Amino acid sequence: MIKGVYGINVAVKDLDAATRQYEALFGIKAKPLSSDFFAFPGLIGSQISINGFHLNLIASLTDDTSVAKFIEKRGEGFFLLSVEVEDIAGEVQRVRDLGATVLMDENTVGDFGAVNFVHPKSFAGIQVEIFEPGERARALDLATA
């Protein structure tokens, strides 16, 4: 079962500039997200938490990541909607049963938690991240509280 919207991820070219801009907008200091926070290598980011909602700004360190390809094709902007779940295996199966295309056969698991992704064509052009937070994500949330 989906617990709620965890947040959104915004693809950006210049992480430092985007972070400063969003910090000024919300009046909240962002937390840095190192590359080991992400399910796939080559990404870095910053997170602004607003009453339990996470705005993640994500930049690519290389030209071959999904974020870099997204920016090249569409420009900076809304990259994905992240929903929080307690049972990722069950939720991924439920989404498949709805007829949606899940991008990975196996969920990606790490200290950040576990994730899988739903193809944008399944939900009106929006990529959905099914996310079960792990120790690192929970620690970041506690540090923000």
Image (tube, rainbow, N blue to C red):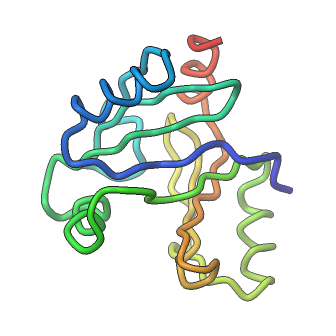
8 vs 132, left or right, is: left
Q: In this view, does 126 lie above or below 138?
A: below
29 vs 67, left or right, is: right
Image position, residue 20 (x, y; %): 30, 24
Q: Name the quadrant of the C terminus.
A: top right
Query: Number of callouts in the render?
Result: 0
Name, please, the residue furthest toward the right: 1
Q: In this view, does 95 lie above or below 17?
A: below
Q: Residue at x 59, y 77 (%)?
A: 102
The answer to which of 132 and 60 lies nearer the viewer is 60
Name, please, the residue furthest toward the front: 25
Quadrant in the rendering for residue 94:
bottom right
Q: Which residue is drawn at 78% across and 52% down?
A: 87
The answer to which of 120 and 75 lies nearer the viewer is 75
Q: Is residue 43 above or below residue 50?
A: below
Image position, residue 14 (x, y; %): 19, 40
16 vs 38, left or right, is: left
Q: In this view, does 22 lie above or below 31?
A: below
Quadrant in the rendering for residue 35:
top left
Quadrant in the rendering for residue 22:
top left
Name, please, the residue furthest toward the left: 63
Q: Which residue is drawn at 30% across and 67% down?
A: 70
Q: Name the quadrant of the N terminus.
A: bottom right
Image position, residue 73 (x, y; %): 24, 74
